[in-house]
Amino acid sequence: MAKALPNYSEEEFRIFIDLHKQLIAESLISGEQVTEENDFTCSLSFTGRLDSADDPLPPLDDCLHVSMRVSQAFLDTLRRDGQAERLPEEKKLPLISSAKDSLLNPDGALQLLGDNLASDLTAPDALQCVIAGTQSGSAVQTRLLKAEPGEIMLMPEIPAQAHPWNNEYTVSINTRYSEHGTLRTGSYGRMLRTPLTLTKMGHPNPPEVGIFTGKESSPHVSVTGHRRQRGR
């Protein structure tokens, strides 16, 4: 309203709306029917039963009701200006919102948080978690520690990739929500990364590979080691 009528502030409209609601409530409490011309009509109604004339009145929470009836003109306006469209059916899918991994610790667990991650079924194919390399390798996770709709925890089994510099992996959840339901898949939007391993550091004949490339002559990162000499 303030955007449509910038000469008035939001606070002024807020005061007006609160006063308008107060006046409607006072009129209804007084037993009057409130009609907004060409818009709607409000009225009070009481429903209750007294078994005898001496019975106390029932609490208002149980017997006092407010009914509202829109006018035909208001309904016609809605039908004229409204639009309807057919939307595709929303499918229930596993949603992985976060992944907390402890891959730097060989005994660490991978925790997946989200929605609709697991069903209550006990069938072998009711839930499947897959960790796959971006270049090669895929492993179905078998060491599940927890499987709930909002959380899955597992001891990760990381598949080997073709090259040592490929350390990025995707994680996805496949699950069924009913015995004969369709298999639904949800993937985490970010990559999991394992530590890069350097072998034969200090060896006189190190392997001719880079860390992020396949050639030692054009590595993206170079690592050099210094031998510390001990004095006698």
Image (tube, rainbow, N blue to C red):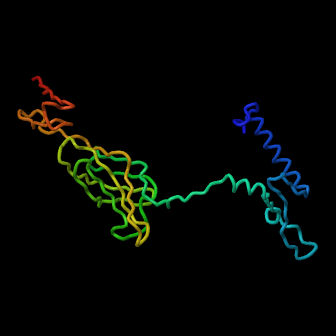
> What residue occupies the far right of the structure in this picture?
53
Q: Is residue 169 left or right of residue 222?
A: right
Is 122 located above or below residue 81 in the figure?
A: below
Question: Residue 151 location, x and y as percent?
Answer: 42, 56
User: Which quarter shows the N terminus?
Assistant: top right
Q: Is residue 118 above or below residue 112?
A: below
Q: Residue furthest bottom?
A: 51
Q: Quadrant of residue 144?
A: bottom left
Residue 37 is situated, as x and y percent measured from the top left of the image, at 84, 52
Above or below, comparing residue 83 to residue 227 in the picture: below
Q: Position of residue 106 (x, y in %)?
A: 26, 48
- Residue at 89 percent across and 52 percent down: it is 27
How many numbered circles does the render carry? 0
Residue 133 coordinates in the image, percent (x, y) = 26, 49
Q: Residue at x 10, y 36 (%)?
A: 208
From the viewer's perspective, tell me whether residue 84 is left or right of residue 147.
right
Quarter of the picture holding the C terminus: top left
Q: Nearer the viewer, residue 55 or 87?
A: 87
Residue 91 located left or right of residue 61: left
Residue at image coords 42%, 52%: 113
Relative to the observer, which residue lies in front, 228 or 149? 149
Q: Residue furthest front?
A: 80
Residue drawn where x is 60% and y is 57% of the image: 84
